[in-house]
Amino acid sequence: MHDPSNNLANMPFDNTNAQFKLATDVMENTNECLFITGKAGTGKSTLLRYFVENTKKSCVILAPTGIAAINVGGVTIHSFFWLPFRPIVENDDEIHRFPRTSQKYKIIQKTDVFIIDEVSMLRADIIDAIDQTLRLNTAYPDKPFGGKQVIFFGDLFQLEPVVQNNEVEHYLFNSYYNSHYFFDARVFRSIHLNCIELRKIYRQTDSNFIHLLDSIRLNKADALDIQKLNARVNKHFVQDIADTYVTLSARNSVAAAINETELSRLSGQEFTYAGEITGEFNSKHLPTELTMVFKEGAQVIFIKNNLDGKWVNGTIGKIHELTTESIKVMLSNGEVEEVRKETWENKRYYWDSANRKVKSETIGEFRQYPIKLAWAITIHKSQGLTFDKVILELEGGLFAHGQLYVALSRCRSLEGLVLREPIKPKDIIIDERVIRFAQNYASLEDA
């Protein structure tokens, strides 16, 4: 049975969690820059949302990608700071000193704290560009980040930054920086970055499975650990028609092909549903398809929380009934719910001169049903989600740091996991630079 309260995206704030309390105290009552991290399923998003909703400080929320920004109610780093989509060097011509009369200058001046989500996906040069921009647009050009408090959320053992395989980026991240990871930004040579590691895992409760996930996360899996995981191999597994397994694949083409094949196997009528964009909303940042095609019986994933708590971002269901004007979905608890179109907002920050406050306004909207086909999704798009039943498709192997850990840690239990192929040692890809940083960062709790 699906219990929305079990999904981390909808988890209430845990007042008994010592790390939650410490983090909120440091964020609210100091001007310290802070890195809030933790394993998959420790409630990083819950803590971020709680702080934003309850702080007395003026906040700007930023994220590396458009979809990540929309999910946390913020804007992209590149759009806020007007950064170019290329490697950025010290004293770069495209680091902006905004006119003192401009909206942007006033917003930066009056913002108390900049919150940056999914920092594992940010390259070192972007962090330094943020530092340089803030120095140029505050009263404290000699202070890191212009004296502003910056809070970083993320897990470096999950998705890593994208680096293009070209000469410029190769030089930048092999000569100028020690690595492409955010922690090697030069600004951190002149500022102490405190860290709070969230330790309580809310997603999994089985200590054996948690141990296996830890061994994969830190590249410490021995032959017995891999053997235990590979006991879940079933190459010819066929799920029952009522089951709601989600196949995770490293490759977008594999996930798309599975969804296309499964949809074509259903015999019913196809229904097409068109979404609407109003105002400014980049079509590359849409949380689901602009035009969707479904049949009754199709497996779908919800991509937005329901205000009544009937489903949350990541809930899996089956389409029960379709008409041209409505969609009904059967959830895993057997309940059939009518799904209505939802609205996603594209926001921007502005300076309210009358009230002398930083505010946000909606500049565009996307309206569509909050679901998408979900017999399969990519490991990349599964980050942050929780599933009861997962099929891991390792065809062609894995190719990126943290991929296997992200995939395995989406599943609530070992019993809910099916492997199409055995895990091989080469599938466990962990960057030793991340392990060294994690071993050396100073935790506030240990101070």
Image (spheres, grey):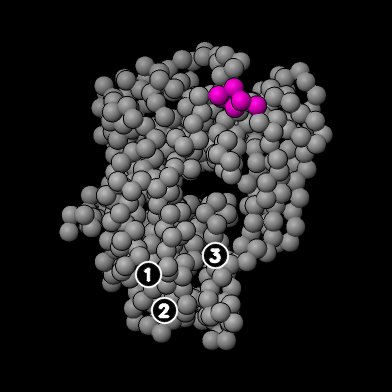
Of 120 and 47, nearer the camera is: 47
Q: Main secondary structure of the magenta part?
A: loop
For the C terminus, the quadrant is bottom left
Circle 2 SS class: helix
Q: Is residue 241 left or right of residue 81?
A: right
Q: Nearer the viewer, mark 2 or mark 1?
A: 1
Image coordinates of residue 354 in percent, x first then y, are 59, 82
Instruction: Residue at 70% x, 40% y: name it.
Output: 340
From the image, tell me which residue sits under label 1.
149
Instruction: Residue at 53% x, 80% y: name it.
Output: 356
Of 318 and 280, nearer the camera is: 318
- Segment colored magenta: 331-336
Q: Earlier in the sequence, mark 2 or mark 1?
A: 2
Q: Are marks 2 and 1 in contact (CB under 8 Å)?
A: no
Of 26 and 196, nearer the camera is: 26
Q: Residues within 10 Å of mark 3 (few under 14, many from 20)?
A: some
Image coordinates of residue 319 in percent, x first then y, are 68, 27
Q: Amino acid at mark 1?
A: Gln
Instruction: Residue at 43% x, 81% y: name it.
Output: 138
From the image, tell me which residue sits under label 3.
78
Q: Earlier in the sequence, mark 3 or mark 1?
A: 3
